[in-house]
Image: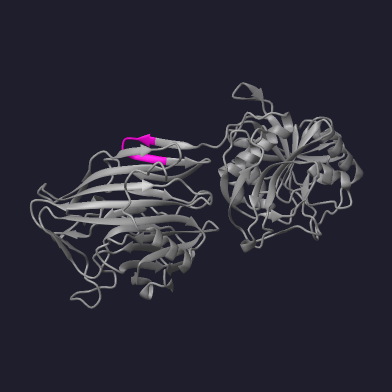
Amino acid sequence: MQNCRGTAVATLFRVGAVWAVVCAAASGHADAGSDAGGDAPLIRVLILSGQNNHDWRTTTPAIREALEETGRFAVEVAEAPERMTSESLAPFDAVLSNWNAWGDAAVSEWPAAAREALVAFVRSGKGYVTVHAGGSSFYSWPEYHALSLAAWDLAQTGHGALHAFPVTFTEVDHPITRGLRPFVIFDELWHRAGIREDAQTLATAWSSPERGGSGEDEPVLVAAPFGEGRSVALLLGHDARALANPSCAALLARSAEWAATGAVSIDPPRIGWDRSDGELARYENGELLWRFLATPDRATCYFDPLRPAGGPSLTWDAPPDHVWHHGLWFSWKLLNGLNYWESPESGLNEGLTEWDPPEFTPRDDGSATIRVAIRYVDPAGVTVLTEDRVIAIAAPDRLGGYTLDWHAAFTAGANDVAFDRTPVLGEPDGVVWGGYAGLSLRMPDLADPRIMTEAGAAAAPNGMGPIEAEALDYSGVVEGRRAGVAMTASPEHPVHPVTWYVIQQPEVPFYFFSPALLYRGPMRLASGERLELDYRIHVHHEAWDADVLRVALGAHSRRPGSEPSAEE
């Protein structure tokens, strides 16, 4: 039966000899006959589903959601498309196929009435859209392949592993693609698909040989007329996760609108900045890429989320096991014997971290600089330490990754400052959880976590402890996608090699790492003396190996934090 959203009720009714399925929606969506915002009638789309060599039970609801969330469509689903007739298709403006007869399918052919009805429907001026493998059927029916535009060619088509790749628009003036920007998606990329020769390629993606691809730019979106109607084939959308990508969802919805009407009114995915007092957030192609939070109601200032474009968030804000962990943040443990690590709600903190309203410099290219003046204040209200923090965030590269150059300059107040931490094993009262302080990242639950240094693979001793290296990458699979965060310390770092405090405990789950400046022992800063720390944080897809880390380490040779020059 049909997949209906919210509390919709599925109703099966008969039109002549054909069974059709309708959703009487009770979930707040407009009825099929109402207007979208009062301006235009809703576009009626019928999704063909119920059989596919892909997981149609999850992808069909994802397709439906992508359409309905625009407010432009009234959507119904047919799970027995072989029962189509001209009468049952008449109410619709477009048909979208998430159905195929690939392999050992229960339904391998359609009766003549269904075939003729679909072809006549589109020829008369209506629309047809296929998603991913939605056109891979009926290899002895040439007219169907002319209609569906793209399919798995039994003699030549293939694909590599699921991975993140950039999508580029080759036709920027077509109504579907006008105003859209290149984006990154984690998906299955077909190569050498069987595509109708006169179809117009609107978007392509590089098929990397390293991923089992062709080494060529491969079409991922094609369009063409069919009689008086229009066809579109979107070869993206292998699974619900890919379809949830805002740019993929926008392509799908804009394709359906163009196929149905010949025009597109749906807005492109959001790109730009959200800025308010103490908060700066960057959106890329509809995704919240990163957000910096420094509002007065918080115990510290931090980043959450941090995600590569088209990938999952790699931060966890206030996990229940340690609510004072905040994504990517900086906190000392002990200053002059007082605890600054835990947040006030824990009841364990003794000192406070305060800051002036941050200065934000966002730029049109997606880069930004954040400046914050921070004070570490003891219970008597005395500022024992000040910090000038400058964070330069780069615009995403073509693969969706970016860097944060984190520069912090600390100055002791009127008195000397003693920096300390929980004792480590081998010291009096030492414990395995001792040694942490400083820049820290709390990651979400990771599947298949991997830790890499410039010397090779590494692991936290007994799931918790030190790793000595100049650079460290921590990656894992989140929501089915592998991504990670790498850190390097500048050559001016006070301790070499860096001792990283790393936690890898899947049973909690607890994934954490920090370039623990104090792990080897306490430090002292004389009154008025200055301590500077520079880190480069790389947010990226996949897992980095030692070679990539060595390249990143070699590139971290200048002190970051300044405004990018014109040449950069």
Of residues 551 and 380, which is closer to you in this image?
Answer: 551
Q: Is residue 463 above or below residue 201?
A: below
* Residue 8 in view here: no
Q: Is residue 241 above or below residue 74?
A: below
- Quarter of the rendering containing residue 436: bottom left
Judge left or right: residue 238 versus residue 150: left
Considering the whole magenta stretch, tell me its main secondary structure.
Answer: strand
- Quarter of the rendering containing residue 36: top right
Farthest-out residue, right: 112
Q: Position of residue 526 (x, y in %)?
A: 11, 58
163 within the magenta span: no
In the image, the segment drawn in magenta is 275-281
Q: Position of residue 12 (x, y in %)?
A: 75, 40
Q: Residue at x 30, y 57 (%)?
A: 439
Farthest-out residue, front: 567
Q: Position of residue 326 (x, y in %)?
A: 34, 52
In the picture, the quarter occupied by the C terminus is top left
* Residue 424 in view here: yes
Q: Residue at x 21, y 49 (%)?
A: 387
Judge left or right: residue 100 versus residue 31: right
277 within the magenta span: yes
Q: Is residue 265 above or below residue 181?
A: above
Q: Position of residue 400 (x, y in %)?
A: 51, 50
Of residues 145 and 172, which is closer to you in this image?
Answer: 172
